[in-house]
Amino acid sequence: MNAARSLPLLAVLCIGCSSTAPPAPKPASAVKPSPLAMTRFVSISARIAADVQQDPGNPGLLAFTDNGDDERAEGPSTFDVLPDGGFVIADPLRQRIAFYDSTGKFRFDLLIYFGAERLRVLPGNALSIVRAQTGQRYIYGVDSAGHYQPPRLAKPEDPDRDAEDEGAARLESPNAATVSANGQTAPVRVLFEAPGESLVSIRRLGVDARGRTYVALSTAAPGDRVDVLTVIRKYAGPGEQLAEIADAPSVALVHPTDEFRMRDGTVYQLQPKGSEVRINIWDTNARP
């Protein structure tokens, strides 16, 4: 009798039911994360110097030339981040490398007697420096007291952080590209979909300890004036986008050889501004 009484109740419960299943949620890779805001910036004083060789000035100041009507100013060209969060910045007009702490306070400088095109920090705080014009790479080792030693030419077995981080990047279309660690890992598929904009170039910035890949996308919209913007993205696996930085300021005064660096999940931008050099910082670790 109990079973008979339960039949009408089942019929009532099924009135208005649909056999159509609810829509499946979008996979994580299809959900575009909201852009990350800049975490902070560090300001380092700079000045325009007519003749830096005759007037070296304050060693804590970085130097620029005065840009003319038809030429871009010269100034800080490349940088890297130390393990303790400090910065090393190439000051080619003074033919030196300047060291600062994480707040932008000047520590010391290292005279190298040539203009640096590329600069990387190696294990033990050794430096890898590529000389402008010649392309020769030098290694500045550190002794047990923490002092930098005279340079030597790099050997094939010396770490090459630039080659490791940049890997291989291929622009396939105005809306797609792939990047990989020189074919050693599965490529990361990068898709760019923005109305009226297209990819101009792509550069791999490196991979963090968790295997997340960071890329810099240069984008532009067609028109009489081409304004190139840079977007930084963080990916997991073959193409799952975890984070995006869309507010990186444009660099107009001096365009560094190395504008962006990534260390331990944090992205850094070298932004020369004339009276100062800013290091803009975005911490992406909140987006695992």
Image (cartoon, rainbow, N blue to C red):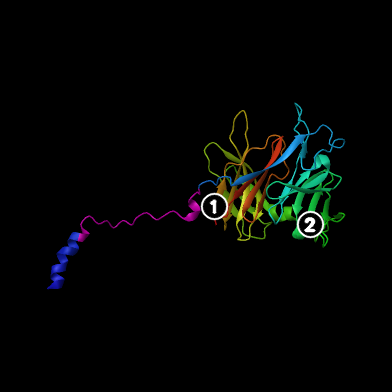
Q: Is residue 160 left or right of residue 232?
A: right
Q: Which residue is mark 2?
A: 126
Q: Looking at the picture, how far across and down is residue 45, in whole percent?
A: 72, 39
Q: Is residue 26 left or right of residue 126?
A: left
Q: Looking at the picture, how far across and down is residue 191, in whole percent?
A: 56, 48
- In the image, what residue type sits under mark 1? Gln
Question: Disc 2 to disc 1, how far (Cα)?
Answer: 33 Å
As drawn, the residue found furthest toward the top would be: 69
Q: Which residue is mark 1?
A: 241
As drawn, the residue found furthest toward the left would be: 1
The image quarter in which residue 57 lies: top right
Numbered circles on residues, count: 2
| Residues in magenta, as a range | 13-33
Q: Nearer the viewer, residue 95 or 226?
A: 95
State the SS at label 2: loop
- In the image, what residue type sits under mark 2? Ala
Q: Nearer the viewer, residue 133 or 79?
A: 79
